[in-house]
Image (spheres, rainbow, N blue to C red):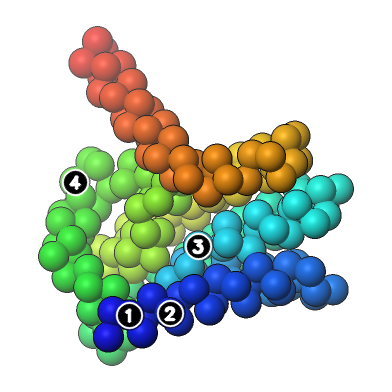
Amino acid sequence: MIGAVRQWLWREKARLEAAAARREALWILFGVAAAEASVFPLPPDVMLIPLVLLHRQRAFVAAAVCTLGSVLGGLLGYAIGHGFMDIVGYRIVHLYQAQAAWQHVVELYRGEAGVWFLFAAAFSPIPYKVATLAAGAVALPLLPFMGVSLVGRALRFFAVATLLWAFGPGIQRLMERYFDWLALGFVILLLLGFVVVRSIG
């Protein structure tokens, strides 16, 4: 079972990388980014990276398309969590074997850390889809949800596009290996800074 899933993921990854060369690549990227925010398992970076390398002059357009698609897809995830959690949402949680983390995420949203968790999920390798579903399930106010999602997703995708635009293929391997860890480290430092500022105040 695990082997079959892994093979499917590798096939999808190869298919998305090939799709980056197609004329309608930006539309496909938009769809992938939207789907990943609620259901699809592969991050849109899988397609964003080869697309930018093929068309470096369109790097920031691609980042903007990826951001918009992801934020709108996040709104769909929010809607599922808010109105269709019993019908659809829990099936998604079970699909990704995220049952153990689900209740913890919900509790984070009910406390002061909710918005920060959403930002961390939008920017780092924490699954964004779990954050969007949980935000809807606890009825996080929509305006903060959209604002934080936009900032976090834009920071992530524009960082990827900027590095590829500036350094080209030479940085691709380093990004694929270390970018998620660097992003997670950035979020941790940001949260620590917030804690320090609050303690001083």
The Cα–Cα distance between marks 2 and 4, rounded to whole angstroms, is 39 Å
Label 4 vs label 3, nearer the camera: 3
Choose top left, top right, bottom left or bottom right for residue 62: bottom right
Determine the residue located farthest toward the top in the rendered image.
Answer: 200
Marked residue nearer the N-terminal end (3 or 1): 1
The Cα–Cα distance between marks 4 and 3, rounded to whole angstroms, is 28 Å
Mark 2 = which residue? 7
Given contact means CB atoms under 8 Å apart, are the residues at marks 2 and 1 in contact?
yes
Where in the figure is residue 61, as x and y percent of width and height? 77, 53
Marked residue nearer the N-terminal end (1 or 4): 1
Q: Which mark is residue 111?
A: 4
Mark 3 = which residue? 43
Picture quarter with the C terminus: top left
The Cα–Cα distance between marks 2 and 1, rounded to whole angstroms, is 6 Å
Label 4 SS: loop
Where in the figure is residue 76, as x and y percent of width and height? 47, 73
Label 1 vs label 4, nearer the camera: 1
Given contact means CB atoms under 8 Å apart, are the residues at marks 2 and 3 in contact?
no
Label 2 vs label 3, nearer the camera: 2
Tell how many labels. Answer: 4
Mark 1 = which residue? 3
Residue type at mark 2? Gln
Determine the residue located farthest toward the bottom in the rendered image.
Answer: 87
Label 2 SS: helix
Given contact means CB atoms under 8 Å apart, are the residues at marks 1 and 4 in contact?
no
Residue at 71% across / 45% down in the picture?
Answer: 169
Residue type at mark 4? Gly
Marked residue nearer the N-terminal end (2 or 4): 2
Residue at 49% across / 73% down in the picture?
Answer: 10
Q: Is residue 117 above or below residue 71?
A: above
Where in the figure is residue 130, as x and y percent of width and height? 33, 64
The Cα–Cα distance between marks 2 and 3, rounded to whole angstroms, is 16 Å
